[in-house]
Image (cartoon, rainbow, N blue to C red):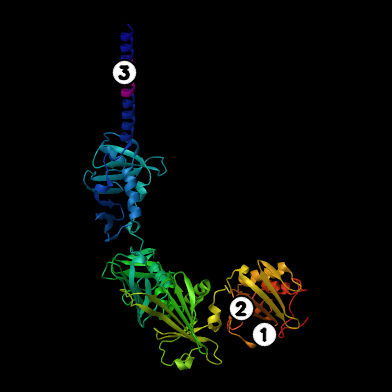
Amino acid sequence: MKARTTLLLLAVAAAAFFFIRLYDQNNLSTRDAEAQEAEVFAKFDRDKLTAIEIETGDENIELKKENGVWNLDVPVHDRADMGVVTRLLTSLETLSSKAKIEKASKDKIKEFGLNKPAIRVRFDGEDIPSKFSIGDDTAASGGRTFYARVADRDTVYVIEGDVKQQLSQTASDFRDRRLMTQRPADATRMVIHLKSGDLEVRNESDEWSLVKPYKARGDTQKIRDLIASLTNARIEDFATSGQAGEDDGLTEPAGSVDLYFDGTEEPETIKFGRSPAEKPDAVYVALSSRIGVFEVAQAVSAVLGQQPNDLRDRNLVRVNPDIVDRITITPAHGEPAQLARRGEEWVLRGAEDRPANGPEILRFIEMLRNYKVQDFVAETASDLQKYGLAQPEVQVSFSSYASQNTAESAAGENLITTVRLARPADAPVAYAHLEEEPFVLSVDPGLLEKIPTSSAQWRSPVVTDLDPAAFASIGLRRTGREPVNFTQKQDTWAGAGIDPVAIQSLANTLAKLRAVRWIGDTAPDQGLADPAFEVAFTIEEESRTLLIGNETPDRMHFAQFQGDTGVFLMSDPDFKTVLAAQPGETPAASAAPSPDREEE
């Protein structure tokens, strides 16, 4: 009994399931049928469409697809605006009716304006309707709805939407308003043809160079911007679909530009004519790859106003910091400063290599490579003596270094560039010359002051790096006072009048002394020939003496180690640590003013 009941219930459930499913399918089919009922085109696949012909009362337009790209073929062969064509195809694919009149009589078709439709459309393509026509607007619709039919069927559709407006566009509306389709990044060469001569630039290893009327480094960013102004130009109006007319100035153009792009041998040539009447902000142009004359913004013709120097690189040097391994700075008087990269660090080369100020060296490279010259003075360097460059005040050479032969360079030091700088007597500017270029350039005289020429100026700011616990003794000598000495044994300082905390603080300072900056070699005004302070210390059986000279206006002090020619600036806190170690002194005490400062 129970088994029969269970089987009965299962049968009822199965019947209910299939009934519900059949009911839903019927409902879904009904919704689909309603949607299909509203569709104007039962089949319309844009991918299978190959041509569209549009006839209006004003003109005939033919669009053809070639290799997946739409072109205007009639009334003029030209590139089509893909955006305009795509919007039209979308409107046709999704076209639906508000209502439809089945089996409309000939009189009704005439009444709806479909016997002589305002717009006729013909399609070519597989499984595509051959014809589509649009008649009159519906009564009292205010132009929002209209009558239409597909092919020569007797079904009339009432349609609303933008498709009528889109099909009513002129041939100019369907034309591509981009003057060119190439990307500016793909340009490899540009030749500007002027009546005065040609100006040519070329892209070499992603850097632009001037090659005519002479060879020089180009302003890469400016040339890129200039090319972009041409490739990104928009057509404001289509002047004519024929050849250049007598009134557009293109028979004898004001100038032209040849643009070469990667992967093509023939250039894209743009000819520039005159401005249209009553349109001074526009100019006529013709393009070698397109039929017709176009109006573009007058600003596009600014390319014809370029002079060779306008496109030249105004950076003093073009050097990649990543490949610079050697820098040699040679002053007119004195020994050269030689800097070398070792791994990630820099050293100052000499009889004994010293750590160099790496961050300052990198800033120096950036300063020179970003420095802009004032003017291009001479195209040839035949008379360097005239500009003081035969014996320059300073010369800076950048080199790379290869440990072994490579395809790009031989082993050893390879010169990248050398720049010479000089300022003749009474000259308002300084002059510069790069060894590998024939030009003479003018620069601000202040640039000479920004180039450290003394080896000492390139030293690392780390003056000492010692262990304070290893100090054996510290002696202090101050002008006008008795010298004092302190000794350290087993981490304990001893001496007359000692302040152990102050002496330990001094030991810590001397062990990790940092220069505010290095000044260079000894000079009389620094007060180091007869210093006011001497701090002598012994560490690991080595004795060193720190000399402290005059105070600067910004309360720093000239300092150097005895036997060393390099002078650095000692900070005021470090100097006060020296004062505090003097018996009877306090950290607030200050040194006597330097001879060159006025006493208050």
- Location of mark 2 (residue): 543
Q: Which mark is residue 407?
A: none
- Location of mark 1 (residue): 527
Q: Earlier in the sequence, mark 2 or mark 1?
A: 1
User: Residue pushed farthest left?
Assistant: 126
Left or right, 229 with reference to 265: right
**Closer to us: mark 2 or mark 1?**
2
Left or right, 302 with reference to 470: left
Point out the stretch of residues depicted in magenta.
12-22
Residue kind at label 1, given as amino acid type: Gly
Residue 492 versus residue 120 in the image, above or below: below
Q: Earlier in the sequence, mark 2 or mark 3?
A: 3
Q: Is residue 17 magenta?
A: yes
Residue kind at label 3, given as amino acid type: Ala
- The residue carrying pointer 1 sits among few (fewer than 14), some (14 to 19) or many (20 or more) residues within 10 Å by Cα, namely many
Residue 45 versus residue 208 in the image, above or below: above
